[in-house]
Image: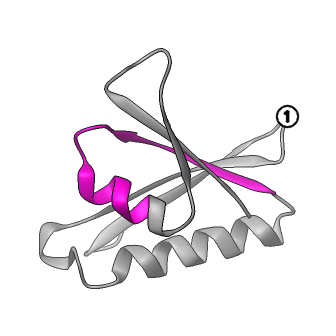
Amino acid sequence: MPLSSGAFQQRLHVATSRCEFAIAAVDSWQGSGLAGSLMAALMDSARKKGLTEMEGFVLAANHKMLKFARQLGFVQHRDADDRETVHGVRTL
């Protein structure tokens, strides 16, 4: 869903009870709490749909996003197929 200050997306994995998130905030909004609010809304929406896990893929060089995801409880591992990407999973 595009916003003037950021965007977020949730993609459901039909065969599982897992969804994937994507989130971005324009530079001027980073650190404002916007991403936290968007993630809370995504996680709440996923729970209401009966999903039990959320996952995301982050570039290994994106240290701010990796820290943000860790603070939200995402367990992170390097992607086995792409060493430049970190895969994060969180139980909802």
Q: Nearer the viewer, residue 5 or 38?
A: 38
* Residue under label 1: 15
At a point 81% along the width and 57% down the height, the residue shown is 52
The image quarter containing residue 30 is bottom left
- Left or right, 3 with respect to 16, comes to left
Q: Farthest residue toward the left?
A: 28
Give above or below for 29 relative to 75: below
At a point 52% along the width and 68% down the height, the residue shown is 72
- Left or right, 30 with respect to 2, comes to left
Q: Farthest residue toward the top?
A: 81
Is disc 1 placed on a helix, strand or loop?
A: loop
- Left or right, 32 with respect to 41, comes to left
At a point 42% along the width and 36% down the height, the residue shown is 86
Residue 17 point in image, percent of width and height: 83, 47
Question: Within 10 Å of the Cα at label 1, are there few (<14), some (14-19), or many (20+) other Cα atoms?
Answer: few
Say whether residue 83 is magenta.
no
Q: Nearer the viewer, residue 80 or 38?
A: 80
Total of numbered circles in the picture? 1
Give, as a three-letter code, the residue at label 1: Ala
Give above or below for 80 relative to 29: above
The image quarter containing residue 43 is bottom right
Colour convention: one colour
Residue 6 point in image, percent of width and height: 31, 69
Residue 50 point in image, percent of width and height: 87, 62
- Left or right, 75 with respect to 53, comes to left
Residue 29 point in image, percent of width and height: 20, 78
Which quadrant: the C terminus?
bottom right
Q: Which residues are magenta?
A: 52-69
Give above or below for 86 relative to 64: above
At a point 46% along the width and 60% down the height, the residue shown is 70
The image quarter containing residue 48 is bottom right
